[in-house]
Amino acid sequence: MTKNKHIPVMLAEALDALKIKSNSWYIDATFGQGGHTKEILNLGGNVIAFDYDQDNIEVGQEKFASETKKGSLILIRENFDQLEKIIKELGLPVAGILFDFGTTSEQLMSPKKGLSFEGEDQELDMRLDDRLGVKAKDLLAVMGQKQLQKIFEVFGGEKEARKIAHEIIEKRRAGEFITTVGQLVQLIKLTKAHNPKNIHPATKVFQALRIAVNDELGSIHRALPQAIKILKPGSRIITIAFHEGEDRIIKNYFKKWQVENKGQQLTKKVIKPTEKEISNNPKARSARMRIFRKNK
Ligand SMILES: C[S@@+](CC[C@H](N)C(=O)[O-])C[C@H]1O[C@@H](n2cnc3c(N)ncnc32)[C@H](O)[C@@H]1O
């Protein structure tokens, strides 16, 4: 298995939580490379899968050609914040929904997306849905210092956000615009003190910009209320979050739904990946799973 190949995270736990029944329909809201979808299909379930990245849909169509032909898999290139409208159009009863947020390893390493520090000359694009109009380099060209600082702090938890934002603005004043991966990495390395033993110094700023460009938290906010609506009574929503910002939104919705008597949170404490999974796939380290069951 190469380091760039996506390994599905908390697969056994997610499948166990979904309680797959043969021939029922499940939504994989974040298809990716189809790791979770594949197992749902193997267990006899049918899948409606969403991904806003056209590359993933094309790979999926090839990988799962016989399932799409048979009618057990419907692949949809769309933001999962369109869930309710699309499921209404399909008219299918939904027995469970899985959200496995974030990105795949393939997306992080893709030469055209500008998400990998290794691609020095790559354009700072960062759009996972290439129908979006604004790239990361556009944000760096137009946003004020305070706005950039806030993005780096809130979406990335970057401690040196102020300094980095200041440096970007200074460069702009001198007529230098940051448009490539290499230029941003270089600016961060020169601005912030870093220990080569720790994570790459640009990790947090890159994560923050990706979240901003793709409005990742906004999509989760819009999608969760739709998910609970379209679910069959007694069915479950499973979420796998990878950072605090995502997990907070989920936690708050689950709490609110329980107070409104819409169902029950089955994970008072989040479920974390096992040590065994983390040693096999270090990228799973920050995963946090939550489960909500809609009332019968
Ligand atoms: C962590 S990956 C999922 C991996 C997948 N479970 C697997 O095992 O292959 C998340 C995927 O969700 C997609 N995604 C993220 N946010 C999305 C959104 N708002 N709408 C549609 N797809 C989204 C990303 O493009 C990415 O492919």
Image (cartoon, rainbow, N blue to C red):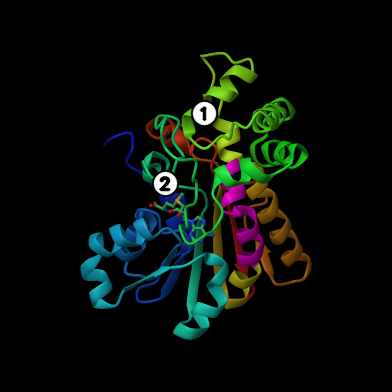
At label 2, which amino acid type do we have? Thr
Q: Position of residue 98 (x, y in %)?
A: 49, 61
Q: Nearer the viewer, residue 189 or 24?
A: 189
- In which quadrant of the rendered view does residue 72 lie? bottom left
Crowd band around label 2 with a 10 angstrom C-alpha radius: few (<14), some (14–19), many (20+)? many
Specify start and end residues of the magenta stretch as a single range.
209-224
Report if the beta carbon of the residue with label 2 is closer than 8 angstroms to ligand 1: yes
Which label number is shown at residue 104? 2
Q: Please state if 294 lies on the left or on the right of 129 as rendered.
A: right
Assign a secondary structure to mark 1: helix
Instruction: State the predominant SS element of the stretch in magenta.
Output: helix
- The answer to whether the beta carbon of the residue marked 1 is less than 8 Å from any atom of ligand 1 is no
The quadrant in which residue 15 appears is bottom left
Q: Is residue 5 visible?
A: yes
* Badge 1: residue crowd in 10 Å (few <14, some 14–19, many ≥20): some
Task: Depth check: give the residue in front, 11 or 135.
Answer: 135
Q: Residue at x 57, y 13 (%)?
A: 195
Instruction: Check if mark 2's residue and mark 1's residue have beta carbons within 8 Å.
Output: no
